[in-house]
Amino acid sequence: MGMLTFRRLNPSALVLLPLLCALASCATPGLGTRQETAEALLAEAHHAKEPAAQIGFALAAADKAAGNLGDERLTYNAACVELAARVGASSGGASLPATFSTPSGTYRLEFNTDRPSGAWDPSYFAKLLPTDEIANKRLVSKAPLSGYGGALVGVSLPPNPRQLLLPKVGVSAPVTAVVNFSKPARSGDPVRAVLTLYDPAKQNSALIAGEKRPLAADLTAPFGYYPNPGEAGILGMLLPGEYLEKEGFFLVQPYDRKKIPIVFVHGLGSVPQTWLPVMAALESHPALRGKFQFWVFAYPTGDPISYSALQFRRALETVYKIYPRTRDMVIINHSRGVI
């Protein structure tokens, strides 16, 4: 075996060693390097098991993307969807305000309590659903959406929904989630993150990363939240007596006394869900969105027309008792849906 030979290094070469080591570590890709990109941080949020970790990485991704929205708008939007869908104790997520720590930093997330124009009250919703979780894919807008912010479907589910003329599954609405960040006043404090839930039917722009920007919106997806009725229409025609409990008015959107109600009445062998594509088309029209609220009258079509008309009028009296400020109602009916 040959002998190892040691040579004395020139003192000037020792000065270069730390620099060479630093360059070598930068040239070697690793997890820490990948986590510094917004896209990789968002991937960490998707892979995380706990809601707190999901929200934390989504915040870090949104924060990173917010610094370069021109190129990372889609990542920012996806991060807003991820973190908004995970907040709320009712959905098994985290209640706000709360602090979330990640390898990229610590964040203090809170809802916007100032309630800017066109913003929802966060407490109104029992859950916020990403649009890719909506069952009726035909009513979900094709991605990617234009604009900024995360498009979701908010679901309000009060304890006794039928007392408010809501479906048993609750009532859905469009939501665009936006998160803004501000640097901490003192070193070591968490970054402040403020989450705002906008109603894109009422507000089409918002302050994001220091600039007023157009909001992303999926105004049709909320209509896809409602379940498929199956054979209820045919059975309601053949066995009307077994479907009387499903009769009455149903609000398809949150009640808003400033909007004109449009009541849809279905025809023979049909169900209220047949009107959902029509509602989606009206709500997504730039000149019409935000001006109307959509309701339906459900009834078993096997009953005599005169009896169904009587039930409609009785149900209408209930509407005016529960929502006495309702005015200027428009009724659209089809086939047997005469009143």
Image: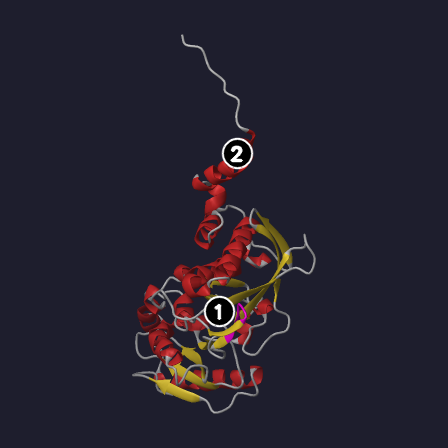
Residue type at numbered disc 1: Thr
- Can you see residue 170? no
Give 50 or 9, whichever is nearer the viewer: 9
Query: At 62% from the left edge and 62% from the top edge, which residue is drawn?
Result: 110
Give the number of marks: 2
Q: Give the magenta-colored segment's residue range.
A: 206-210
In the picture, measured across the screen, residue 283 lies left or right of residue 87, that is: left
Q: Position of residue 166 (x, y in %)?
A: 50, 73
| Residue sticking out furthest to the top | 1
Which mark, residue 17? 2
Q: Residue at x 40, y 69 (%)?
A: 221
What residue is at 43 percent from the left and 80 percent from the top?
A: 294
Q: Are marks 2 and 1 in contact (CB under 8 Å)?
A: no
Residue situated in front as seen by the camera: 156 or 84: 84
247 with respect to 159 (left or right): left
Give the SS element for disc 2. Answer: helix
Closer to the chain start, of discs 2 and 1, is 2
Q: Residue 272 location, x and y as percent?
A: 37, 75
Mark 2: give few (<14), some (14-19) or many (20+) Cα within 10 Å.
few
Q: State how the image is colored.
A: secondary structure
The magenta stretch spans residue 313: no
> Quarter of the image containing the N terminus?
top left
Sort mark 1 into few (<14), some (14-19) or many (20+) by Cα contacts within 10 Å: many
Is residue 258 in view?
yes
For this view, does 11 lie left or right of residue 39? right
Please tell me whether mark 2 or mark 1 is closer to you in this view: 2
